[in-house]
Image: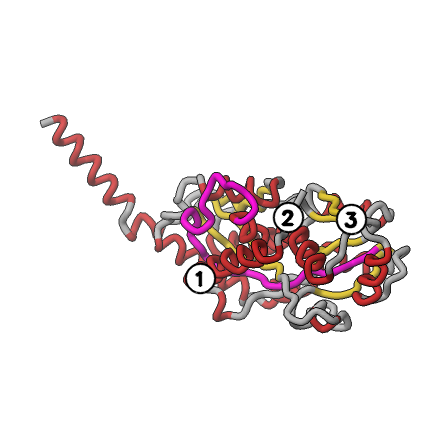
């Protein structure tokens, strides 16, 4: 009888824990928002802006944790293996969709995450050191072809979005430019400013201030349409390479099997944050354009995420994109 009573008590406890009433109590403690890049990077800035508003909506602190390394895959692995209780979330993005085609992963990017909401969609900016005589993409291509292997490009790490943007550019232009990987965009900028590397494809937020100060020269952006943050800059597509597109996007994810009620509550809080005029203004200043309202559902993010993995898989295979 004692064993039966204990079993019944255990089952009752599980039922209560899984009940709508228990889930509506979420959150009852601080939430950790994991970012795969160092402090000062664009995803870190986006996460802190979002985290502050989520905390206000949910009534509990949201602690941003920067877990840099392996092009965001260390952070992604941590999120994938976290308890599916809504207390460990991740801001994942474009760098993750190339990983399945480049690495043997310890997690499944499709099966191990529960999409919550897409947050931003922007582009990279192609910048060069001021000593580089090229004033536009056409001149840069001519310069690079005149000295094969003589120019270098920095990235935030092998396999990262900044790296893959440069590799796609090399493939589109048939250029020989050497790759110099760093541990994040922030770590690469001092060497770019000092002329120790020639160029970089960077999230707009990270280099816009020094471009405005005249310390770096911006040549183009990687989206199909011009960026509202720098409307004066042409796209690479309109600079002679039609169809060239690499986007910088970030979305909020939870571990797979997170209860639907918690995912919905997180989505509601995210929508409230993205609809906040102050957040919209701040995001625009850092070049992290917010996605359209019809792209903010868990269902949309899930389909978009899978389609981007497939798209980049084809691009990587077709172009033979390799990394050091």
Q: Are marks 3 and 2 in contact (CB under 8 Å)?
A: no
Rendering quarter of residue 278? bottom right
Q: Is 248 placed left or right of 186 in the picture?
A: left
Q: Position of residue 144 (x, y in %)?
A: 82, 57
Q: Position of residue 184 (x, y in %)?
A: 69, 45
Please tell me which of labels 1 and 2 falls first in the chain: 1
Q: Is residue 53 visible?
A: no
From the image, tell me which residue sits under label 3: 189
| Magenta region includes residue 319 | no
Between circles 1 and 3, the one closer to the viewer is: 1
Q: CA distance from mark 3 to mark 2?
A: 23 Å
Residue named by callout 2 = 322
Disc 2 secondary structure class: loop
Name the residue that disc number 1 marks: 303
Q: CA distance from mark 1 to mark 2?
A: 27 Å
Residue density around tag 1, few if under 14, some if 14–19, many if 20 or more, within 10 Å: few
Task: Write the start and end of the magenta stretch as one range.
Answer: 101-128
């Amino acid at each position: 009888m004692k064993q039966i009573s204990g079993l019944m008590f255990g089952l009752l406890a599980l039922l209560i824990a899984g009940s709508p009433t228990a889930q509506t109590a979420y959150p009852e403690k601080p939430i950790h928002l994991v970012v795969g890049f160092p402090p000062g990077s664009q995803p870190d800035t986006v996460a802190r802006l979002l985290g502050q508003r989520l905390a206000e909506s949910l009534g509990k602190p949201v602690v941003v944790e920067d877990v840099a390394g392996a092009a965001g895959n260390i952070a992604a692995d941590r999120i994938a293996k976290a308890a599916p209780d809504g207390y460990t979330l991740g801001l994942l993005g474009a760098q993750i969709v190339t990983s399945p085609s480049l690495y043997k992963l310890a997690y499944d990017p499709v099966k191990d995450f529960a999409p919550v909401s897409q947050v931003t969609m922007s582009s990279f900016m192609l910048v060069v050191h001021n000593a580089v005589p090229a004033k536009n993409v056409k001149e840069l291509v001519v310069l690079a072809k005149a000295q094969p292997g003589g120019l270098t490009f920095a990235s935030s790490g092998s396999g990262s979005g900044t790296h893959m943007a440069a590799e796609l550019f090399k493939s589109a232009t048939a250029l020989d430019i050497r790759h110099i990987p760093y541990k994040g965009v922030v770590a690469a900028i001092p060497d770019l400013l000092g002329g120790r590397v020639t160029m970089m494809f960077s999230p707009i937020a990270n280099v816009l201030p020094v471009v405005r100060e005249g310390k770096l020269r911006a040549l183009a952006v990687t989206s199909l349409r011009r960026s509202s943050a720098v409307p004066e800059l042409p796209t690479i597509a309109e600079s002679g390479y039609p169809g060239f597109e690499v986007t910088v996007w970030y979305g909020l994810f939870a571990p797979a099997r997170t209860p639907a009620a918690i995912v919905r509550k997180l989505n509601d809080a995210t929508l409230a944050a993205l609809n906040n005029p102050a957040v919209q203004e701040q995001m625009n200043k850092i070049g992290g354009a917010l996605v359209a309202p019809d792209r903010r559902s868990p269902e949309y993010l899930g389909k978009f995420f899978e389609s981007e993995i497939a798209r980049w898989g084809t691009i990587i295979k077709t172009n033979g994109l390799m990394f050091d």
